[in-house]
Image (cartoon, rainbow, N blue to C red):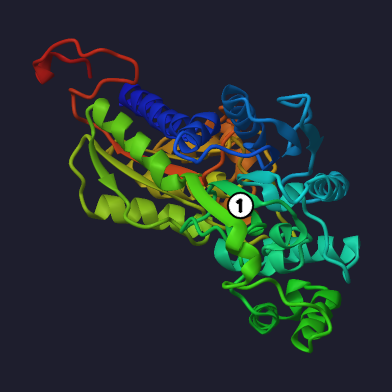
Amino acid sequence: MSQLLDRLRTDAVAIYAAAVAGVEPRRAVTRAFATTPPPNPSHIIALGKAAYPMAAAAVQHFDRLEVPIQGGLVVTPDVGDSPDPRLRRVTGDHPVPGTRSRAAAAALQDALAAVNHRDEVWVLISGGTSSLVGAPVDGMSEIEYDLLVRALARAGLPIAALNRARKRFSRWGAGRLVSAGRGDRIRVFLLSDVPGDDPADIGSGPCAPDPSSAAEILALLDALGSEAGVPDAALRYLERTIRGIVPETPKPGDPVFERVTTRLVGSNALALDHAEERARALGYEVRRHPTPVTGEAGTVGRELIRSILADDPTPGTAWIGGGETTVSLGPDHGLGGRCQELALAAAGELAPYRNRRRVTLLAGGTDGRDGPTDAAGAVVDSRTWDAIREAGLDPDRALARHDAHPALTAAGALLRPGLTGTNVMDVMVVLVGDRPNLRAAGDQPESDNPHQAGS
């Protein structure tokens, strides 16, 4: 059984890797550029975790067409050289905006100021943009903005609601990049990291109209209650907007968006297509979850295993899903991320099957980083829970304190691919083993007769 579980782990990691490779940013935007009208002289602005490879692909495209690049900006979570001397590269903070994010937001203002009315602006947006250029709107201090961002993160809001609220107070969110920018045309290319792939939600929608009113956001924040820690300054800002003292965000139908074209170049659904293709190549019968996986990570992990096993899946089944769960942090919490918490909760559900079912679950962020940790997520099976206990840790307490990282470290269950350069939410894979003709990732079948294949 141990050998089979190890093989299932290998296969799960291979399926995850195929999902990530399928949405590699450079390849994704290059496909989109091939069917985009030839550009005029342009400025390139790339924001997010995938900013570097997306910008590099844009530079290559422009140079092949011999179209001048007038300048631009690349904002990334890591420090390094620019993909091209004509583009300035700066570093923002992630996952929580900080001092570097303020500097990146100022650099974006400088980059937009350099655009003249005859030029195009190509804006390349990927996950992480909200934090990397996170800075407050006029009327809020940096401290008040930081308190708001942290309060919203703790509240456990669905990602769409979180985005609607956060972008209202963000300098470059809610269509404000278009409002502030010049240029004959703005072409936007999006690598989606949100369920539904709505441009208004991706990266806080810097180039998309904001359909939410200030009154709606005020009601959302009021519903969180005073214990959520939303600063009064945020509520006052919304009240001033409602009274017309502060301008509303640009809305659908605003003429400012007539010069904007938007293209989705990659998404979680595309990543899952590649995961499904790899799973079938390995010999699995695939079941695909029809909707994005959302909700509290711990609850999702438990319910996912219960629902899959309740259906009594045929050995050799691969369940594949994707989305983005949430973790509602209390005042006393440990270290982890949503994928790690989901996996740890799933391990608890799998523990009673240690001698009866061969099931492995992988939950991993496609960006390679789950929360403020060095892991993308984890791969667990029916041995994981006991392995944590044998290491001297209490997995129940780890779940209660949102402290999955040290528990999964002790069990050797963490998934550590390193930063991947892309970001299209999370991938979840559940493999049910026992079928002798399943082959490990990278193996070639030994025979056309399944009974002669390794077990």
Which SS class for mark 1? helix
Classify the position of the C terminus by image quarter: top left
Residue 179 in picture, x, y percent from top left: 73, 63
Residue at (83, 45) in percent of width and height: 114
Residue 301 in picture, x, y percent from top left: 45, 52
Residue at (55, 51) in percent of width and height: 396
**Which amino acid is tagged 1?**
Arg
Residue 120 visible at all: yes
On screen, 421 above or below 341?
above
Q: Nearer the viewer, residue 53 or 281?
A: 53
Q: Which quadrant holds residue 428?
A: top left
Residue 28 in picture, x, y percent from top left: 48, 35
Residue 17 in picture, x, y percent from top left: 45, 29
Residue corresponding to mark 1: 397
Classify the position of the N terminus by image quarter: top left
User: Which residue is the extreme one toward the front?
Assistant: 118
Residue at (38, 45) in percent of width and height: 350
User: Which residue is the extreme one toward the bottom?
Assistant: 243
On screen, 87 above or below 139?
above
Q: Which quadrant holds residue 282?
A: top left
Q: Nearer the viewer, residue 446 or 291?
A: 291
